[in-house]
Image (spheres, rainbow, N blue to C red):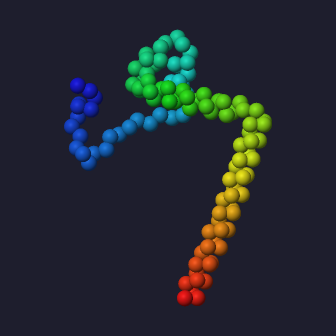
Amino acid sequence: MGRSTDKETGLSEQRKYRTFTAQRKLEIVLAGLRGDRSVREVCREHAISETLYYGWRDQLLEAGKERFAGKEERQGDRELRRKVAELERALGRKTYELEIAGKLLREWN
């Protein structure tokens, strides 16, 4: 049958997964994008699933899109981060105020 039947594994044993470096993932994805071999052949050569390959490809393309984003798009991201930080500080202040009010209420009773 499949590879999993080559060795009996108990319920308490964990499967060991391979890890790929960022450089290795990039090489595999670029090999598929070049077009001199099919994606299926590249995946078979590196013993990975096509689903994993396409996930890596999508991550690469998304990172490239973010890298090439214009100044206005990056400025929008910066503004959102500033707003999130401001809201987190406000939430922290309100949480602190509630803790003090709760403590005073417990002491008053």
Q: Residue at x 38, y 37 (%)?
A: 17
Residue 46 at x, y percent in the picture: 42, 24
Q: Residue at x 47, y 18 (%)?
A: 39
Task: Determine which quarter of the picture holds residue 59.
Answer: top right
Residue 35 at x, y percent in the picture: 54, 13
Task: Determine which quarter of the picture holds residue 49.
Answer: top left
Residue 78 in view, yes or no: yes
Q: Judge left or right: residue 12 versus residue 90.
A: left
* Identity of the residue furthest to the top in this view: 36
Task: Determine which quarter of the picture holds residue 68.
Answer: top right
Q: Residue at x 62, y 69 (%)?
A: 95
Q: Judge left or right: residue 27 versus residue 77.
A: left
Residue 79 at x, y percent in the picture: 75, 47
Q: Judge left or right: residue 88 versus residue 109.
A: right
Q: Is residue 108 above or below residue 73?
A: below
For the image shown, how many numbered marks are present on the structure? 0
* Identity of the residue furthest to the front in this view: 109
Of 21 and 77, which appears nearest the observer? 77
Residue 8 at x, y percent in the picture: 21, 37
Residue 24 in view, yes or no: no
Query: Which quadrant of the figure contains the N terminus?
Result: top left
Q: Residue at x 50, y 30 (%)?
A: 55
Query: Which quadrant of the figure contains the C terminus?
Result: bottom right
Q: Is residue 98 above or below residue 12?
A: below
